[in-house]
Image (cartoon, rainbow, N blue to C red):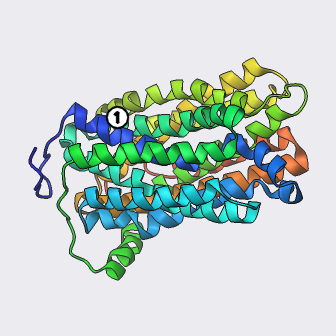
Amino acid sequence: MNDARRPGDPGPYSRPLLLLLATIAGVSVANIYYNQPLLDRFRESFPVSASWVGAVPAATQLGYAAGMFFLAPLGDRFNRKKLILLQTAGLALALTAAAGAPSLAILAATSLAIGVLSTIAQQAVPFAAELAPPAQRGHAVGTVMSGLLLGILLARTAAGFIAQYFGWRAVFGASVGALAILALVVIARLPNSRPTSTLPYGKLLGSMWHLALELRDLRDASITGAALFAAFSAFWSVLTLLLAGAPFHLGPQAAGLFGIVGAAGALAAPIAGRFSDKRGPYAVITLSIGLVALAFVIFAFSSTRIAGLVLGVIVLDIGVQAAQISNQSRIYALRPEARSRVNTVFMVCYFIGGATGSAVGAYAWRTFGWLGVCAAGVLFACLAAARHLSAPAAAGAPH
């Protein structure tokens, strides 16, 4: 492999390398979702703070947004391989601290650190866009995003299974082992990248503000993506609480198994990428918003029906994943020399949306019950539609 690539050079583009980047994305991003099926166990472990268990996933997603802003832009400035290895080491330390957390407050604090350092995934996705020829960029991003999305969804399954038999602290310990194996593979197989920017760190961060102001498509994609991910997070943050109560009385393993159902939707990622390459992303995003709204209508009629929840999960995950692939394919074409920074603007907004959705979902659950959560999901989808439909249909060019 040619490790020294110049900007614009497709470099060592190959399916094995895309699969490695997909694995990096999936294994790292999974860490911000392990806590969602564990909320009932956190409540049992910390009964004094039980009403605030929703702070754990919210802190993790806020940490991810912070990590995106302060760490992810460094991919334009430094060798991405070294950044991935450094963040992997820090993430392993944060997970070790979470495994031993003696209180909910400390668990939330360590979850914030886990979120910051799990942004390893956001080095992998723009790396794929850099390596791919322009005509295959959507497919490359879709392939790596399939790994990321499978990591998101199967994280809940793995966490639920481990917690059911070994306790919730073992979930974080198992992740440390997975990261150690991943680091060895990265050292052996991942090529080096050549920086595309020489800006000092402060100016590198400041340039993102100018990119957001200059690029209408970036603003549209960021706001639409944030609203859809808010809907997604509102559902997943409270699903374990719904299943723990009547009439289900199911533990974290059952909640985690819904991740397998949702993983079927990850198959939509490469398909959405190819369709976006051929037809443009606007139509895919429009359809995706409709699917997210439909999912919450299904959920509203399924508070006591597993089959309805399963159907809704499939529709929700396909909608959110297809929209994200199309949005990212759209923004990576805007500034090839600043892909990490463009991706940072998008993903910071995306995970602020996720943290908002988790907090709104927890509040709606406590105050209005399951129908309140469903109403919040529909509202977020409507916000996405309002922004998306106000944008030019011929999205993809700088504005």
Q: Which residue lies most toward the top here?
A: 307
Residue 330 is situated, as x and y percent measured from the top left of the image, at 36, 47
Say which quadrant the C terminus sits in. Answer: bottom left
Q: Nearer the viewer, residue 213 or 142?
A: 142
Say which quadrant the N terminus sits in. Answer: top left
Per the image, label 1 sits on a secondary structure element best described as: helix
Q: List the residue tagged with mark 1.
A: 143
- In screen coordinates, is 123 left or right of 151? left
Residue 389 is situated, as x and y percent measured from the top left of the image, at 53, 47
Report the residue at 20% width, 64% height from top. Answer: 195
Report the residue at 53% width, 30% height from top. Answer: 318
- In screen coordinates, is 178 left or right of 136? right
When the figure is inspected, residue 30 is found, relative to residue 342, above or below; the finding is above
When the figure is inspected, residue 364 is found, relative to residue 164, above or below; the finding is below
Report the residue at 51% width, 45% height from top. Answer: 175
Residue 299 is situated, as x and y percent measured from the top left of the image, at 75, 30
Image-quadrant location for residue 193: bottom left
For the image, the number of numbered tags is 1
Residue 34 is at least partly visible in this image: no
Task: Please name the amino acid that badge 1 sits on.
Answer: Thr
Residue 247 is situated, as x and y percent measured from the top left of the image, at 89, 25
Report the residue at 80% width, 50% height from top. Answer: 45
Would you call the spot at circle 1 few (<14 residues within 10 Å), some (14-19), or many (20 or more)?
A: many
Residue 22 is at least partly visible in this image: yes
Image-quadrant location for residue 132: top left
- In screen coordinates, is 384 left or right of 242? left
